[in-house]
Image (cartoon, rainbow, N blue to C red):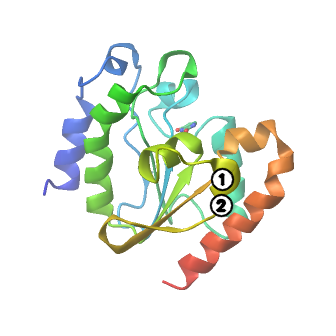
Amino acid sequence: MKSWDELKTECMQCRRCKLGDTRTNLVFGVGNPNADLMFIGEGPGEQEDLRGEPFVGRAGQFLDQMLALINLSRDDIYIANIVKCRPPNNRDPQPDERTACSEWLFAQIELINPRLIVCLGRIAAMCLINPDFKITREHGQWTPFLGGREITAIYHPAALLRDPAKRPETFVDLKSIQAKYSAL
Ligand code: URA
């Protein structure tokens, strides 16, 4: 297994897919590399690409508020994305880009070794839980994941900004994350 520093150094130079041609900065991830709880989003947006850090735009500020509701901060968890470079015009990451990037994400999961993983939104859930994942029906459900972990998905913070009617259900999901986390 690579060390964390080796992984990061190699990943930062990645040119495995075409997103490497258009990125400003690669967005490796942020937080506690020994976290028991890992959040995984879709891919960097404009602000994230400019700053090299995940979830720093409007959706990211909302994510911080969601975490605060269950007494968590970015220092308690690790946050990464399915793809580490911004898809142009914020389009969905394409299958070849997700595949090219998955080795980095799985190496991060192996090194961080979180007990619980939370997918932020449909794309992350389709990549990690089930290609047919339906976020409206299946958000908040826990499923076994590689290495004796458990995984769930909640609405993406950008979706919650667009549609506040989804927030009460997400509050229930956050409470379930809090309960699992406190029981570890
Ligand atoms: N949306 C994501 O899925 N990830 C980010 O890092 C920012 C916005």
Assess disc 2: are there few (<14), some (14-19) or many (≥20) residues with their C-alpha within 10 Å of its C-alpha.
some
Marks 2 and 1 sit apart, C-alpha to C-alpha, by 5 Å
Snapshot quadrant of residue 157: top right
98 sits to left or right of 110: right
Circle 2 SS class: helix
Q: Residue furthest right?
A: 165
In the image, residue 147 above or below residue 123: below
Q: Which residue position is annotated with label 1? A: 64
User: Three-letter amino acid code at disc 1?
Assistant: Asp
Q: Residue at the spot x=84%, y=45% of the render?
A: 164
The residue located at (21%, 49%) in the rendering is 5
Give the SS element for disc 1.
helix
Residue closer to the observer: 132 or 88: 132
Residue highlighted by disc 2: 67
Q: Using residue 123 as the reference point, say whether residue 97 is left or right of it.
A: left
Give the vertical position of 53 relative to 135 (above or below).
above
Q: Which residue lies furthest to the left in this view?
A: 1
Q: Is residue 162 left or right of residue 107?
A: right
Where's residue 107, x and y in %? 25, 52
